[in-house]
Image (cartoon, rainbow, N blue to C red):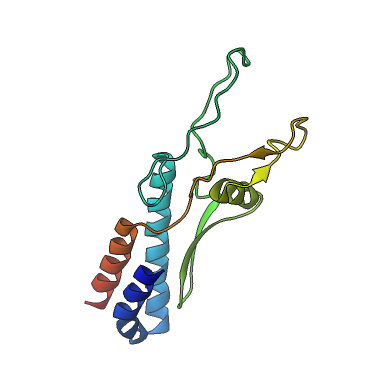
């Protein structure tokens, strides 16, 4: 968190001088860019820091025939479930609705039942960081703020 604190201290005085409406507009732009960045990370199956996601659990050899395997979190990264919100003081990217629980289980590596009707016991999922700030994201935020101020 010390990196974020230093980042915040450098720009807080400049941001405070802007009008509330302009700050909200700037926060909305930051939120949209961050959402796009997070969507690209999820599509590339990597955490915000650039490390790849933990591999899926191996499936039995005699699994269902003709089953199409999709990439992980294909629907989760859509704009329907990943919302970008902004106010005059903050910009957030979050999962909404029922997918929020599933995203939390995968993000923190918690235990969960694979489906409601599953006879299986709870499964321990690997931690896969879905949302977060990397160095590229911090540079992106900094550039948006600098462009807005100048």
Q: Position of residue 92 (x, y in %)?
A: 48, 64
Residue at 58% over, 22% down: 59
* Residue 42 higher or lower than 142, as above or below: above
The C terminus lies in quadrant = bottom left
Total labels: the figure holds 0
Q: Is residue 144 left or right of residue 21?
A: left
Q: Nearer the viewer, residue 65 or 2?
A: 2
- Going by the picture, which residue comes out furthest to the left? 150
* Residue 144 higher or lower than 61, as above or below: below
Q: Is residue 38 left or right of residue 75?
A: left
Q: Is residue 117 left or right of residue 112?
A: right
Residue at 37% over, 70% down: 4
Q: Position of residue 46 (x, y in %)?
A: 40, 43
* Residue 133 higher or lower than 128, as above or below: below
Q: Position of residue 62 (x, y in %)?
A: 61, 12
Looking at the rendering, which quadrant does residue 60 occupy?
A: top right
Q: Nearer the viewer, residue 62 or 38?
A: 62
């Amino acid at each position: 968190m010390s990196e974020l604190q230093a980042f915040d201290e450098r720009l807080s005085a400049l941001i405070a001088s802007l009008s509330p409406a302009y700050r909200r507009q700037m926060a909305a732009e930051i939120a949209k860019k961050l959402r796009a960045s997070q969507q690209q990370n999820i599509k590339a199956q990597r955490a915000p820091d650039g490390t790849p996601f933990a591999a899926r659990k191996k499936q039995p050899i005699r699994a269902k025939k003709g089953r199409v395997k999709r990439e992980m979190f294909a629907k989760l990264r859509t704009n329907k479930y990943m919302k970008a919100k902004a106010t005059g003081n903050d910009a957030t990217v979050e999962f909404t609705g029922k997918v929020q629980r599933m995203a939390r289980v995968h993000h923190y590596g918690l235990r969960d039942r694979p489906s409601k009707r599953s006879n299986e016991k709870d499964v321990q999922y690997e931690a896969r960081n879905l949302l977060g700030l990397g160095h590229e994201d911090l540079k992106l935020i900094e550039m948006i703020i600098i462009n807005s101020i100048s």
